[in-house]
Image: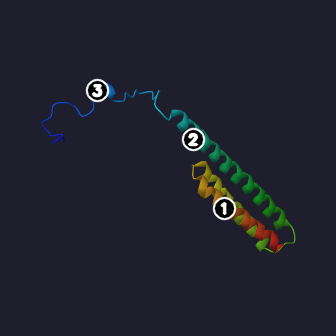
């Protein structure tokens, strides 16, 4: 019988083979991968937030231009709704919800394109 019992006095892992983790985290395997992932995530957040803000401003500008013209009321409303969806996408992108932000950016752009078709 080779199993351990509660009465064994030797530790299951020898002290010299246990990994030593310091407070600064240096020397751990995967630190470079974690930093690269954090950099990619940060870049994705900025891209999602920036694209959402840009599309929001474009939608608001289009809504204001169509509002002053002779377009039907649903055209500026569609642009304004698309701009609001893109603003929500920018907020979600800024908070790190980049996948949801991407889908909202697509939906907001499609709403604005639908408004363009009404014109």
Q: Neighbour class for label 2 at 10 Å: few (<14), some, many (≥20)?
A: few
Residue positioned most to the right: 70
Left or right, 6 with reference to 29 = left
Left or right, 13 with reference to 28 = left
**Residue plotted at (77% across, 67% down):** 113
**Residue plotted at (80% across, 58% down):** 61
Query: Which mark identifies residue 37?
Result: 2
Asked which quadrant contains residue 20, the reply is: top left
Which structural element holds mark 2? helix
Name the quarter where the N terminus is drawn. top left
In the picture of the structure, the residue carrying the numbered disc 3 is 15
Front residue of this view, candidates 47 and 38: 38
In the picture of the structure, the residue carrying the numbered disc 1 is 85
Instruction: Estimate the x, y position of residue 99 in percent, counting from the top left.
Output: 60, 55
Q: Between marks 3 and 1, how big is the CA–CA gap?
A: 57 Å
Q: How many marks?
A: 3
Query: Which mark identifies residue 108?
Result: none
Q: State which tag comes first along the sequence, 3 or 1.
A: 3
- Mark 2 or 1: in front is 2
Q: Between marks 3 and 2, how big is the CA–CA gap?
A: 33 Å
Front residue of this view, candidates 22 and 2: 2
Q: Neighbour class for label 1 at 10 Å: few (<14), some, many (≥20)?
A: many
């Amino acid at each position: 019988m080779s199993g351990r019992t509660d009465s064994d006095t030797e530790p299951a892992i020898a002290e010299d083979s246990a990994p030593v983790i310091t407070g600064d985290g240096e020397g751990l395997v995967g630190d470079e991968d974690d930093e690269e992932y954090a950099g990619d995530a940060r870049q994705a957040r900025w891209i999602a937030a920036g694209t959402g803000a840009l599309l929001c401003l474009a939608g608001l500008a289009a809504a204001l231009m169509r509002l002053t013209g002779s377009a039907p009321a649903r055209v500026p409303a569609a642009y304004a709704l698309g701009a609001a969806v893109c603003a929500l996408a920018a907020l979600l992108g800024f908070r790190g919800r980049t996948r949801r932000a991407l889908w909202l950016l697509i939906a907001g752009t499609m709403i604005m394109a639908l408004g363009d078709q009404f014109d």
